[in-house]
Image: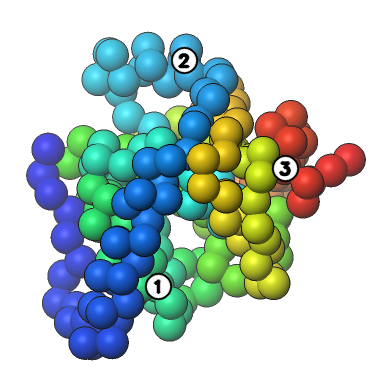
Amino acid sequence: MTAVRVAGRRRSWRTSALIGLARMILRPWLASLRPRVKGRAWLDRQRAEGGQVMFVFWHGQMLPLVRVHQGQGVVVLVSEHGDGELIAGILESRGFSTARGSSTRGGSRGLRELVRAARAGHDLAVTPDGPRGPAGQCKPGVVTAARLAGLPIVPVVCAAERAWYLNSWDRFALPRPFSAVNVIYGPPIEVGDLPDEAAVDEVAQTITRELTRLSQEAGDPRFAA
């Protein structure tokens, strides 16, 4: 596969130092987690046949999924907001690649980078409610990205049995060390030709409902019915 890199971007010494510190903390922390995975049969068949996918997951559930998919060359769409460079550096240190942009800033460039990565043979990953919310609501741009990349959408959620939750817009989850983490993959959502914006919105609503349903099944208290 062709490596995907963040082009023309220089990190400040402060950001580089924070990335280094985060790497030291995250390595033993993530290694201590105990993923319990469900619903991977279709995904495993797809990968065995050389097929690619676009993962979608809520922004606040990101951290445990770094543990599950590290080192697989997945290309993650990361915001160009202030904390995006820190997140990109952490992801790259765990074997991910990044495309920079979002639905609110740099979206077109991020979309082009995702399509390029898909053509190079990579799986993609997008937080449909990122980078600034509203939490738990899929944005239509995710559907457009999947259609242009020609990839099926695979919803994935995770919930730790014991976790801290930050006081942020998405109540970002920090699984406690040595916690069991429920990881659930939903059935693929195929994105074909979409005739108008209403059709795009309908798929986005389907993604929202499915991620919410799976989050409840996984036991995420932020999505309690």
Rendered-image quadrant of the C terminus: top right
Mark in the foreground, 1 or 2: 1
The x and y percentages for residue 143 are 53, 46
Q: Is residue 203 visible from the viewing direction of this image?
A: no
In the image: residue 101, left or right of residue 99: right
> Which comes before the other along the chain, label 2 or label 3?
2
Q: Which mark is residue 129?
A: none
How many labels were placed on the picture? 3
Which residue type does callout 1 highlight?
A: Gly
Residue, far right: 225
Q: Determine crowd level at label 3: few under 14, some 14-19, many 20+ residues with C-alpha closer than 10 A.
A: many
Which residue type does callout 3 highlight?
A: Asp
Q: Determine crowd level at label 1: few under 14, some 14-19, many 20+ residues with C-alpha closer than 10 A.
A: some
The x and y percentages for residue 29 are 42, 50
Q: Secondary structure at mark 3?
A: loop
Q: Secondary structure at mark 2?
A: helix
Identify the coloring: rainbow
Q: CA distance from mark 1 to mark 3?
A: 25 Å
Q: CA distance from mark 2 to mark 3?
A: 23 Å
Q: Quadrant of residue 84?
A: bottom left
Relative to the observer, which residue lies in front, 195 or 192? Answer: 192
Q: Quadrant of residue 19?
A: bottom left
Relative to the observer, which residue lies in front, 167 or 77? Answer: 167
Residue at horizontal 69 percent and vertical 72 percent from the top: 167
- Check disc 3 and report the residue beneath it: 220
Residue at horizontal 37 percent and vertical 56 percent from the top: 26
- Check disc 1 and report the residue beneath it: 84
- Check disc 2 and report the residue beneath it: 42
Residue at horizontal 23 percent and vertical 48 percent from the top: 95
Which residue type does callout 2 highlight?
A: Trp
The x and y percentages for residue 34 are 49, 32
Residue at horizontal 70 percent and vertical 54 percent from the top: 136
